[in-house]
Amino acid sequence: MTEMRAAARSAQYGEAGEDPIRVMVVDDALVIRGMLSRIVDAEQGMTVVASVGDGERALRSLERHDVDVVVLDIEMPRMDGLTALPKIIETAPGTQVLMASTLTLRNAEVSMKAMELGAADYIPKPSSSGAIRTADEFQRELVRKVRALGKISRRRKKVSGTQDKGRTDTEPKTFRAGAAKQAAEISLRPMQNAKPEIIAIGSSTGGPQALFKVLGALGPDVRQPIVITQHMPPTFTTILAEHITKASGRSCKEAEDGEMLKPGNIYVAPGDYHMVLEGDGISKKLRVNQDPPENFCRPAVDPMLRSIAKAYGNRVLVVILTGMGADGKKGAQVVVEGGGQVIGQDEQSSVVWGMPGAVATAGLCSAVLPVDEIGPLVKRLATTGSAT
């Protein structure tokens, strides 16, 4: 029945000149598979082409179906999600994998491992308390992620094997607008040669791996406190902080309400809480709150950046990494108006060029760079006050 519905919907969209995003649902729970399939099939522009109960069946289905997005459960019989993931990526290059799991420490750890192995993103199942609060919110989150990842899959399959032709050997790395030509023109602000007093990072889809690369490149000489808002649910941010500690070699923890910022430490916004700063004379204090979501997110980047701009003025360095949506754009505008500066990740190295694309195309960035070049630039600015 799933294949018949997919064929009918493909024909329907074909007549309209559209090509629906093709989704495979992999979960051993029939009720969950049915729920996910109904949500996807109800959306215009996407369709379920296969619904199976374990990783082995998923791999066999990939031999028969062209799939853009796989929604993959972690715990399954015969072949679990973590075992199936690299096989799916190998079998269907360019296909994007969205991990689905309940909110436990073990599953958060496994999901983080899955992203290291190539999964694009994750979504907590609706039975998980605290992350997705209503069925409507879960549906919106699933549809948003499937649609974004489906577009990425199509684009990557189309351009697979292309070379970077946007860079010349004489082009200054700090001031260029990415390693490849961007989808939109970017106007860069002048780079300020000044040491920041705080470094703030915002990220979402694809963010954990980008964070590990950027923070791992800083070394021990960067002594400014670093605050991070990564769109993640509770439990996941706990695991993220542990992984950042390992990747960066410095202390990283979830922020606690009322604690004072310490030089050289890294603080992550806890899942389901905004993280902001308050000025307290020379010292600065972290606050966490459950104010309404912004940009459909909590934690959100915008409130963090607004508070930092108020507390630190022009002594702020912001980095916006890969992520869907535009969270961080309004906050970055406040930072720039206060004299701070912004670095964005380029399109080619981003899993989703939503958040960094929003700040880049708005003319808020002083540099738009591949993720591998962001850490070295941040290190130079933080330690010497110079971009070169």
Image (cartoon, helix red, strand yellow):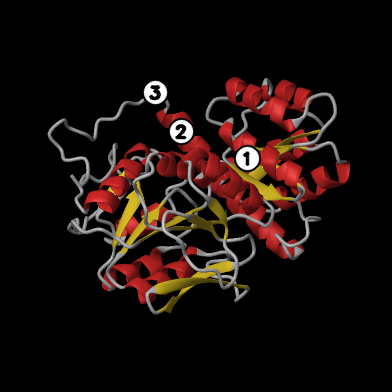
**216 lies above or below 35:** above
Q: Earlier in the sequence, mark 3 or mark 2?
A: 2
Label 2 environment density (alpha carbons within 10 Å; few <14, some 14–19, many ≥20): some
Position of residue 297 measured from the top left corner of the image (x, y, whole percent): 57, 64
Position of residue 161 measured from the top left corner of the image (x, y, whole percent): 39, 23
- On the rendered structure, is 305 left or right of 92? left
**Callout 2: SS:** helix
Label 3 environment density (alpha carbons within 10 Å; few <14, some 14–19, many ≥20): few
**Callout 1: SS:** helix
As shown in the figure, which amino acid type bears the numbered disc 1? Met
- On the rendered structure, is 235 left or right of 363? right
Q: Which residue is the site of mark 2? A: 156
Residue closer to the observer: 277 or 172? 277
**Mark drawn on residue 167:** none
Numbered marks: total: 3
Q: Earlier in the sequence, mark 2 or mark 1?
A: 1
Q: Which residue is the site of mark 3? A: 161
Residue closer to the observer: 87 or 22? 87
Residue at 34 percent of width and 40 percent of height: 370
Q: Earlier in the sequence, mark 3 or mark 1?
A: 1
Distance Cα–Cα, label 3 vs label 2: 9 Å
As shown in the figure, which amino acid type bears the numbered disc 2? Arg
Residue at 61 percent of width and 20 percent of height: 91
Quadrant location of residue 68? top right
Q: What is the quadrant of the N terminus in the image?
A: top right
Quadrant location of residue 346? top left
Distance Cα–Cα, label 3 vs label 1: 28 Å
As shown in the figure, which amino acid type bears the numbered disc 3? Gly
**100 lies above or below 338:** above
Q: What is the quadrant of the C terminus in the image?
A: top left
- On the rendered structure, is 320 left or right of 68? left
